[in-house]
Image: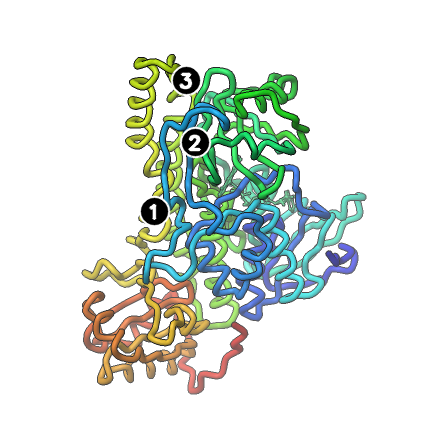
């Protein structure tokens, strides 16, 4: 991976991203594809294979990767294709009895028109490697590795960011805007005086990656993306990192010391028998439920784990951070390109905070029942008492864990209810993700949307002229897409509108059957309400 010596970084950029984890890299891709001059500062020379952490990339993240042209690349690198398994199994051990099973989990199965990309199981490092490459391709030399941000000072005009190259040498980079994607120990968060608010779980967890040649031969339940092991010896969550011998595991209620000492015993407990295994890395962690008291100070923003933390159950943390990066990315680009007003940046926190808070609530609910809570005597007994215990466990598992594995309403269904750039509307589609549709030729509706605003015309005679003219006057990039029959009529009926104004992030900004009464005011609202001079031409940079 090529990197740039921090002493050769540009002195001035439009956006400096502190932190090249998944969220910072995603922000850089979103910005870079829009022609914004971006710089990412990241301490880690290489991505960490020792802490795979995220495995669940949800449908929404895969939709963004598709928009960036990266979905196929990611899937090609992911060791477990969705077709390999879409199951989560609860069992007394890998070689023991099955207690219950969820199928079609985590968006891994297509559902007709509902989404163009299924979810994907992939270790976090696979995503990070793909995104690092993409940043290098889009903005060569703008991923600075081995360096970290140590200071952030701003005035009305710009932000001065001090970058340390790891040897104590420092340079100052001036940026129009800064995004702090520097994770839980965010320096940027400290520098702007923001702080986490919330709590943490009482129980520790012990993550590890291990290699166990031959373990698959003992797995009694067939392929699954997660095995929840419910026994007294090693209550745990375990899954394959690849289709050969590498596994990840989380021992519930296991602290660092115990985990380091007893890792081999835990692996045997998970397997339900002694197995050959080598621990490759360990990763103790405790769940935290936190959001920052503010996500922005002037020209500096926070995104991803720097801004919010949730328990990992359900697989939402990174995915929510990618949502932050997309939201902030197109908005900063709109401002830097001259068509976004101040309201567009104000909308970042008002749109993202409710999502983050809901994710924290749901992930916390998912954490209430883990293998430790599901354990009961007799689960492995051969007699009638054993059968009864297993039936009871099965019922409880289905009652308490379903929402964790079937969460598409959360992933796709969240609607922006209160935003300065989404005009108040009666329709429930306003502020929602544009319902997806495959066109007659098999293309995704999302593939025909433009990089700026898109006005979808759902009938031949849909009156597009007023909105088109307003966008032209205001210098807002807007493309008109006429949906062909036969899909258009059904789609118009579903939305209850002939016209749909779609944002760059595939969110419905406005919809109606007739042209809006005041199209200029609509465009001003969606563009952040800046008092801007009227443009006479719509010449803009268009890089997406
Ligand atoms: C066990 C576990 C399982 C998980 N599973 C999932 C899952 O399945 N799905 C999911 O969506 N999420 C999951 N998560 C959450 C996910 O790992 C995080 O949400 C994700 O890593 C957040 O990405 P980020 O880029 O915001 O922060 P980080 O990944 O923490 O990246 C921050 C980056 O900033 C860099 N940095 C630090 N300090 C500085 C500095 N001063 N200057 C510049 N850079 C700096 C760091 O080197 C790092 O690269 C899981 C978490 C855990 C613990």
Please state if 306 lies on the left or on the right of 457 as rendered.
right
Work out how far the residue at label 3 is from the one at label 1, CA to CA, in angstroms: 35 Å
Residue behind mark 1: 410
In the rendered image, the vertical position of residue 543 relative to residue 203, given as above or below = below
CA distance for labels 3 and 2: 39 Å
Q: Evaluate whether residue 190 shows in this view.
A: no
* Position above or below: 429 against 469: above
Return the x and y of residue 9 as percentages of the image width and height: 73, 60
Which labelled disc corresponds to residue 380?
3
Query: Residue sitting at 60 percent across and 20 percent down?
Result: 274
Image coordinates of residue 345 in percent, x first then y, are 44, 59
Q: Residues within 10 Å of mark 3 (few under 14, many from 20)?
A: many
Sooner in the amino-acid sequence: mark 1 or mark 2: 2
- Tell me which colouring the rendered structure shows: rainbow
Along the line of sight, which residue is nearer the eye, 384 or 76? Answer: 384
Position in image of residue 2 (x %, y %): 75, 58
Q: Please tell me whether mark 3 sits on a helix, a strand or a loop.
A: loop
Within the displayed image, which quadrant is ligand 1 positioned in? top right
């Amino acid at each position: 991976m090529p990197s740039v010596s921090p002493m050769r970084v540009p002195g001035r950029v439009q956006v400096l991203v502190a932190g090249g984890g998944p969220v910072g890299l995603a922000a850089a891709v979103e910005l870079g594809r829009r022609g914004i001059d971006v710089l990412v500062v990241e301490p880690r020379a290489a991505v960490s294979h020792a802490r795979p952490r995220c495995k669940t990339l949800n449908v929404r993240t895969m939709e963004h990767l598709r928009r960036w042209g990266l979905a196929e690349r990611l899937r090609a690198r992911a060791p477990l294709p969705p077709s390999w398994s879409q199951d989560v199994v609860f069992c007394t051990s890998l070689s023991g009895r099955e207690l219950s099973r969820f199928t079609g989990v985590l968006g891994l199965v297509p559902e007709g028109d509902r989404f163009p990309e299924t979810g994907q199981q992939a270790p976090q490092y696979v995503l990070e490697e793909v995104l690092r490459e993409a940043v290098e391709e889009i903005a060569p030399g703008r991923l600075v590795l081995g360096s970290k941000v140590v200071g952030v000072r701003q005035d009305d005009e710009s932000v001065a960011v001090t970058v340390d190259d790891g040897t104590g040498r420092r340079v100052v980079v001036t940026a129009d805007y800064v995004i702090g994607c520097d994770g839980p120990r965010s320096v940027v968060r400290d520098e702007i005086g923001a702080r986490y608010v919330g709590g943490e779980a009482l129980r520790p967890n012990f993550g590890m990656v291990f290699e166990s040649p031959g373990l698959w031969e003992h797995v009694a339940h067939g392929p699954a993306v997660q095995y929840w092991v419910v026994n007294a010896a090693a209550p745990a969550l375990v899954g394959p990192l690849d289709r050969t011998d590498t596994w990840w595991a989380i021992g519930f209620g296991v602290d660092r010391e115990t985990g380091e000492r007893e890792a081999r015993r835990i692996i045997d407990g998970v397997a339900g028998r002694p197995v050959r295994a080598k621990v490759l890395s360990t990763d103790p962690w405790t769940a935290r439920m936190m959001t920052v008291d503010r996500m922005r100070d002037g020209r500096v923003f926070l995104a991803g784990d720097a801004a919010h933390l949730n328990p990992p159950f359900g697989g939402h943390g990174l995915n929510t951070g990618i949502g932050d990066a997309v939201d902030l990315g197109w908005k900063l680009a709109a401002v830097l390109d001259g068509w976004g007003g101040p309201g567009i940046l104000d909308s970042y926190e008002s749109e993202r905070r409710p999502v983050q808070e809901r994710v924290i609530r749901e992930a916390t609910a998912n954490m209430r029942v883990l293998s430790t809570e599901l354990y009961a005597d007799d689960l492995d007994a051969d007699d009638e008492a054993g059968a009864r215990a297993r039936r009871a466990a099965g019922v409880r598992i289905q009652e308490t864990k379903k929402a964790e594995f079937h969460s598409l309403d959360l992933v796709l269904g969240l609607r922006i209810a209160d935003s300065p750039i989404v005009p108040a509307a009666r329709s429930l589609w306003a502020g929602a993700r544009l319902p997806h549709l495959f066109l007659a030729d098999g293309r995704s509706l999302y593939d025909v949307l433009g990089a700026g605003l898109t006005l979808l015309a759902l009938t031949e005679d849909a009156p597009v002229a007023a909105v088109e003219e307003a966008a032209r006057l205001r210098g807002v990039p807007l493309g008109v897409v006429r949906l062909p029959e036969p899909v258009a009529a059904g789609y118009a009926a579903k939305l209850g509108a002939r016209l749909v104004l779609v944002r760059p992030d595939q969110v419905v900004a406005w919809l109606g059957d007739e042209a809006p009464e005041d199209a200029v005011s609509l465009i001003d609202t969606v563009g952040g309400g800046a008092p801007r001079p009227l443009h006479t031409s719509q010449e803009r940079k268009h890089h997406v």
